[in-house]
Image (spheres, rainbow, N blue to C red):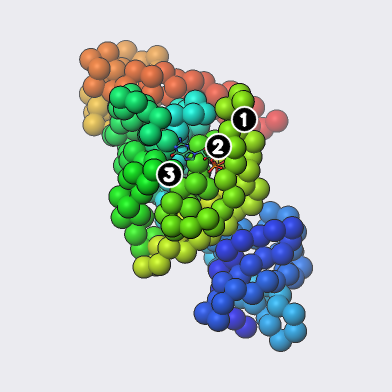
Amino acid sequence: MIEGRVVKEVGGRFFVKTDDGVMVCSARGKLKEIGELYVGDVVFVDDSDSPVIEKLAPRESMLVRPYVSNIDGIVIVLAVTPQPDFLLADKMIVGCVEQQLDAIVCVNKCDLDGSGDLVAKVKTEYGGVADVIAVSATEGRGVDALKGMIRGRFFCLAGQSAVGKSSLINALCGGERMAVGALGRNARGRHTTRHVEIIELGDGTSIADTCGFSRYEIPLVDPATLAGCYVDFDEYRNVCRFRGCTHTVEECCGVKEAVAEGKLPKERYDRYLQLYEEMSKRWEKRYG
Ligand SMILES: Nc1nc2c(ncn2[C@@H]2O[C@H](COP(=O)(O)OP(=O)(O)OP(=O)(O)O)[C@@H](O)[C@H]2O)c(=O)[nH]1
Ligand SMILES: [Mg+2]
Ligand SMILES: [Zn+2]
């Protein structure tokens, strides 16, 4: 059997990269069911006849949106247009903390960000929890710096449709690898990329292009533990009077004080309350 990595899946056919090149494979038994094999999976292929994936190696990490496995981190792409959905980005960062993945927040289309307002805002929101980088896929600005940040590792690009994920892949590999969409008149995008695909950039670096999305559900967690995924709150929680403070309704809360003093971004905190509320509702209904 030959070992390889699933680098792309289209309509039940899996493209598996091995030392000898890419093989187009089908899958055996349960593995051929939808949602069983992910791009990023390490698999074993029987090529005695037409190549078939027989076995799956254990996964080190796994995301269900986008569907990809064995990544080291996520490049969360925001852009000047379409309008950034910060709650979506918060949720992706919670997902990264839970799976112990690196998060890079990448602000694309900074050629349209005149005086740098969006970049400044994103740095305020996420500077305490992730690396933030400003790029322009079309003008090439910041692309080498981004490449440096992911060197030697496997990252996936994630974010809303039309933020420029595929354009960034093209800029990173200096070619026209991925199809790029046009912006719709409402600037909401049209979902150009329809499958996940891994592109190797050399030096052991690879990056996955993924389909844009506008909804992202983090796995259900006890709302009491949600604040633990906000690492920017860490330095203030020892001021909280109550152990296990959720930083919502409690008195004498270090996080709330930090927000009031402008040390933590107010909008991110407000979205935390929103997510806390959402999670509490899901938690109450967890048994049906
Ligand atoms: N001005 C400007 N436009 C950009 C930049 N990057 C991408 N675009 C444009 O944004 C549009 C969408 O780009 P895509 O790369 O297809 O976006 P995507 O995130 O891959 O979208 P989906 O595949 O639908 O998820 C295209 O019209 C690109 O030309 C940039 O840095 N500056
Ligand atoms: Mg795309
Ligand atoms: Zn608190």
Q: Which class describes the residues within 10 Å of circle 3: few (<14), some (14-19), or many (20+)? A: many
Ligand 1 within 8 Å of disc 3? The answer is yes
Amino acid carrying mark 3 in the image: Ala
Tell me if label 2 and label 3 are in contact, CB under 8 Å.
Answer: no
**How far separated are the C-alphas under marks 2 and 3?**
12 Å
Q: Nearer the viewer, residue 164 or 2?
A: 164
Q: Nearer the viewer, residue 60 or 283?
A: 60
Tell me if label 1 and label 2 are in contact, CB under 8 Å.
Answer: yes
Q: Residue at x 34, y 18 (%)?
A: 266
**Callout 3 secondary element:** loop
Q: Quadrant of residue 28?
A: bottom right
Q: Which residue is mark 2?
A: 162
Q: Position of residue 182 (x, y in %)?
A: 59, 37
Quarter of the image with the N terminus is bottom right
**How far separated are the C-alphas under marks 1 and 3?**
18 Å
Amino acid carrying mark 1 in the image: Gly
For this view, does 185 lie left or right of residue 255? right
Q: Position of residue 70 (x, y in %)?
A: 49, 59
Which of the two labelled residues, at mark 1 and mark 3, occupies the earlier sequence position? 3
Q: Which residue is mark 3?
A: 137
Q: Residue at x 53, y 51 (%)?
A: 209
Ligand 1 within 8 Å of disc 2? The answer is yes
Tell me if label 1 and label 3 are in contact, CB under 8 Å.
Answer: no
For residue 139, above or below residue 86: below
Quarter of the image with the C terminus is top right
Q: Residue at x 58, y 33 (%)?
A: 183
Q: Nearer the viewer, residue 145 or 271?
A: 145
Which of the two labelled residues, at mark 1 and mark 2, occupies the earlier sequence position? 2
In the drawing, what numbered circle is on residue 184?
1
Q: Residue at x 30, y 50 (%)?
A: 145
Q: Which class describes the residues within 10 Å of circle 2: few (<14), some (14-19), or many (20+)? A: many
**Callout 1 secondary element:** loop
